[in-house]
Image (tube, rainbow, N blue to C red):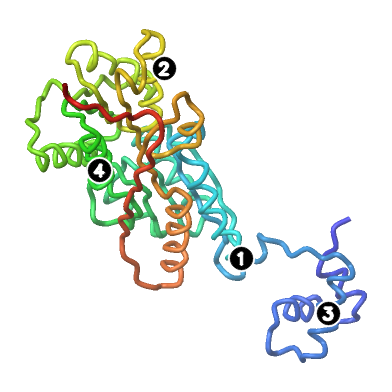
Amino acid sequence: MQVTIKDIAKVAGVSHTTVSRALRGHPSISAETTRHIQQLAEQMGYVPSAVAQSLHSRQTFTIGMVVTTIADPFLPQVVEGVEKVAQAAGYSVFLMSSHNDPEQELTVVETLQRRRVDAIIVTASRVGSLYGDQLERIQVPIVLINNQENGEFLHSIAVDDVQGARLATEHLIEVGHRRIGFVGLLTRPKSNVHRLLGYQAALEKAGIPQDPDLIFLPPPNDDFQCGELALSLHLKHQVTAVLCYNDITAIGLLTTCRRHQIAVPQDLSIVGFDDIEAAQYVSPPLTTIRQPRLRMGELAMRMILDLLNKKSVRDQLLPGELIVRESTLPIYPN
């Protein structure tokens, strides 16, 4: 049976109030009594009640984390980073899914708040300025990772989408490509615009005319199918390289190329974004922009801890890193 404070008090011959105070290191209890009761509690296998501790401290030592879907391969390292810092600080993490639906996301956030979590982390948030009043009323610290809507009232950790897309496009230009397509996703409005801006900035810097036909924004669908549809950039518009919104889209395009006997990278070079684990195992391995996912999770949780300790924080924008693999190949004009 579970050992209680009353069990320890009976063995120690003191009141349960004395035991409770001694276990918390209360100054009203002598050092000798405190030491004796804490040793006795350890010997008897006493496990403190998290509920009782939260009632005393008015903290639950839990963090709510809202993700788009647990199937998203981008998330494992982000969650790992959050949990690593949270556990070291004595916090537990509750994970809930929004299914990439803004209304569901807000419902999940409000559910976590009713569960009395101490703070909330939201990944790929689409809440943004749409629900500013509601979020202000929640009254717990909220940190967004890769926020998908504009809004200045929340704290955020994000990758620099403009910089990352510019880096990827510059790589394709440097190895000789001039007809470079862009595949975006309408389900990620903010980062899609920023990655398109990075792509366009690289073309402009290189003096390459921008062709609207080379920008492909498929109807909202799952990311892999959007990549499949993007083959039209090569078949209809003779692009020699494509920058995809993310790795899943790039893998969808790569798979469709294989089905149509289009050689990658000999006929078409493909670049992704994120550097999920699968990127290095597909054939050919995918050139991509690496997001520092583990670090993003760690920084988000550290920001939460600072907010809980009433410290000032600043939003952070992290650079992406170009990872060159075998899905891109230099081409040179005849």
Which one is closest to the eye, mark 3 or mark 2? Answer: 2
Please tell me which residue is depicted at 68% across the width and 89% down the height of the picture.
27
**Residue 102 coordinates in the image, percent (x, y):** 34, 36
* Disc nearer the start of the sequence (1/4): 1
Q: Describe the element under mark 2 as helix, strand or loop.
A: helix
In the picture, residue 192 is in which quadrant?
top left
Among numbered discs 3 and 4, the one appearing first in the sequence: 3
Q: Is residue 118 left or right of residue 209?
A: right
- The residue beneath circle 1 is 55
Point out the residue furthest to the top here: 260
Which is nearer the eye, 144 or 281? Answer: 281
Q: Which residue is mark 2?
A: 255
Give percent across and percent down for residue 98: 43, 36
**In this view, which residue lies farthest toward the front?**
334
Placement of the C terminus among the 4 image quadrants: top left
Which residue is disc 3 drawn over? 37
Q: Which mark is residue 264?
A: none
Q: Element at badge 3? A: helix
Marks 3 and 1, how far apart at CA: 22 Å
191 or 263: nearer the viewer = 263
Which percent across, then down, holds residue 240? 23, 22
> CA gap, disc 2 to disc 4?
37 Å
Q: Earlier in the sequence, mark 2 or mark 1?
A: 1
Q: CB of mark 2 within 8 Å of CB of mark 1?
A: no
Question: Along the horizontal axis of the image, is 170 left or right of 33?
Answer: left
For disc 2, the neighbor class at 10 Å (few under 14, some 14 to 19, many from 20) is some
- Gap between marks 3 and 2, in whole Å? 65 Å
Image point (56%, 53%), residue name: 83
Task: Please tell me which of labels 2 and 4 falls first in the chain.
Answer: 4
Marks 1, 4: nearer the viewer: 4
The reply to whether discs 3 and 4 touch (Cβ–Cβ < 8 Å) is: no
Residue at (25%, 27%) from the top-left corner? 331
